[in-house]
Every structure is written in structure tokens, then in C-alpha cells.
Amino acid sequence: MLPATKEFIGYLWENPGEKDFSIMEALLTPVILFGKQEDGDTLIQTVFDHPFDIGPELLRPIFNRFGRKEDAHRLYNTFIHKENLVNPNYSEVFHVLGSMGYRPIVPVLLEYAFQEDDHEISKNAVMGLLHFDCGEHTGIFTHEIEEVMEKSLFSEFVPALVCKVPENGRLLHKLYEFGSTLCSTDCNAGILLGFSLSGTKGGDYFKKALFDSHWEAGSFSTGTVHYAYQGMENLEISFKDIWKDILQMESKAHPLDVFLSLLEVRLRLPLYASAKAEPFLDIYQSVFSGFTTESGIYKTIWKHDLLEQFYQMEKEMQMRLREEMIVKACTGTSSV
């Protein structure tokens, strides 16, 4: 077993009360990256021994990396009782069981997905449903999405289920019109996510919304930027692609703000982030490498008074690039 696994578990039990999430994530990172199944089994048993002592945000990386079918069943029995969530603070388990493909959770997800009294629970239930073939429920999804478009504030992630509706072209268009006019920017993240999961048709709407100032896709205060970034991953849009698009735009101020916000999201992701995450090496080569006062990107950013922010981001990118190279060297995946 890795020393890091013991250290993570030690921190968990030697610090009663509320734990510091940043410390826990840092301690967990080497286990996720380098741990064997023995390490994973130890972590998972720790979760079952003390299910409500570990932060719910850490359940997904642990179970997605090390979880097995029998663990999904135990997870369900630990956090769900008679199709009800045992602890409302642990609705993240909906997303975890969805990502593990544990189909018995579907009726529970359907029960919680359309509740309007708890944003987090509804969100995680929808996120769980996105992992399943839901053909028999598309009528319900269409109805609930249509209902959403009669309000300015609603359960934000219900529109993401548009990707589960066959022949959804009309619905996608209505969601785009709704998001561009009546929808509050506090509630448009689910629409962006739904676009990004709806193939080429949805991708076209996603790209239009991304740089439309009405959507505020780069906003950290509403959290929309995190799902704009997720949409980039889903559609395999690179930062180089986005930069090329910005250079063709007549008005660049808002698109540049979105671009830098998306970069910041990528910088914040842990090293064990999604396999779809664009490597730092690729981002650095396409955005920062060869950066001089004569380059087009310099002139554009300088013109919009974003140079200091860009330089700071470059330093952070260099640090993350070094981390990435160390991980690649240790796992034997480096191609540089």
C-alpha cells in the first residue's frame, strides 16, 4: 500500500470535525494517480466504515478510479434507504452511481431530478441520469424541459436532459432562444451542458452561446463557467480552437474574458481530472509557447488591458505543466 494512502486515512481520522477540502484533495491525488487496487479497496472500505466523514466531493474520484460492481451495490445500500437519500448533503452519490452504471438507482434519480426545493440534489440526480439509456422516460424529460421554459428561475440542470430526447432539434432551438432572452444567467448552465451532449446540432448552439455576453458563460459567480468548460471537453473543443475563433471576431473583449475564465477552470482541475481534459502541454504550446511582443495573441491581449492577468496565468500554467511532466515520467506515459 502507498504511504500516501495511509497519510490520507490518517488525516481523515486524526482531524475530527470539518476537514479542509484542499488538504484532503491534495492527499488523495497521489493515491488516485499511482495507487493499486489494494489502495483503492482500503479507501473504499474507509468510506463504508465512516460514510459521512469523508467529503461528498471525493466520492466520485475514489469510486470512479477503484470502484467495482459490488461496491456500487454497497454504496447504494449505504446512502439510499427505501429509495430515499439518507443524508441530503450526500446527493453526490447519485452522480457516482450513475457514472458507475448502477441501474437500480434510476427510479430514485427520477424521483429527485425534478424537485425544485434543493438545487444540489436535483443537479446530482440529473447528472446521474445522463449516464443511462433513458428511452422510456423521454416523454417525462420533454415535459419537464418545456415546463422549465415557462420560468426564469428553475431547477438549473433539468435542461441538460435534452440530450436524452430523440429528434430534439426543435427543443434545442427553443432552449437556445430561451437562454438568450428570458432565462436568468443563474440558471443557464444546464442548457449549455445539454447542448454539449447533443452532438453536432447541440454543439452549434453551444458555440454560439459561449461568446454571447447574455449567457455570461465565463462567470464564476454563477458557476456557469464550469459547465462551459465541461462542454468544451464533451465537444472536444481545444483552447487553440477557441483562440482561432476569437481572432476572427470583430469584438474581442467579452470572448477574451470567457477564454481566460475557461483557462482558469482548467488550471484549477486536479491532476486526476477527466481523461478528456486537454493536456497542459498542448495548451501551453498553442497559447503560451513563443509568446512575444510581436505575436498576435500579445497584441490582442495588450489592447484589451489583460496582459497582467495573462502573464500570471502563464506562470501558473508553467507550474501545472511541470506537474504533468512529472506524472507522465512516473507512469511511463511521457512522449516528450
Image: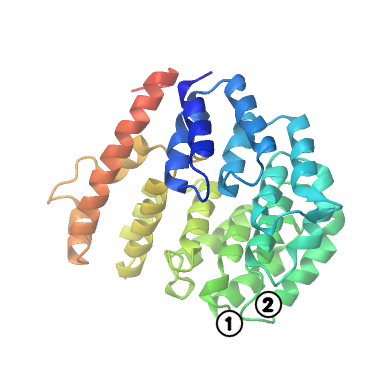
Q: Position of residue 75 (x, y in %)?
A: 74, 40
Contact? badges 2 and 1 (CB < 8 Å): yes
**Observer-nearest of 33 and 235:** 33
Secondary structure type for disc 1:
loop
Quadrant housing the N terminus: top right
Establish if 207 lies above or below 313. Answer: below
**Observer-nearest of 199 and 116:** 116
Establish if 233 lies above or below 176. Answer: above
Would you name the residue on which mark 2 appears? 149
- Residue at the limit of the structure toward the left, as seen here: 293
Would you name the residue on which mark 1 appears? 182
Residue at 58% over, 55% down: 196
- Hey, what amino acid is under mark 2? Met
Quadrant housing the C terminus: top left
Q: Position of residue 308 (x, y in %)?
A: 18, 58
- Hey, what amino acid is under mark 1? Leu
In the displayed structure image, the side of residue 202 where residue 106 appears, left or right:
right
Q: CA distance from mark 2 to mark 1?
A: 8 Å
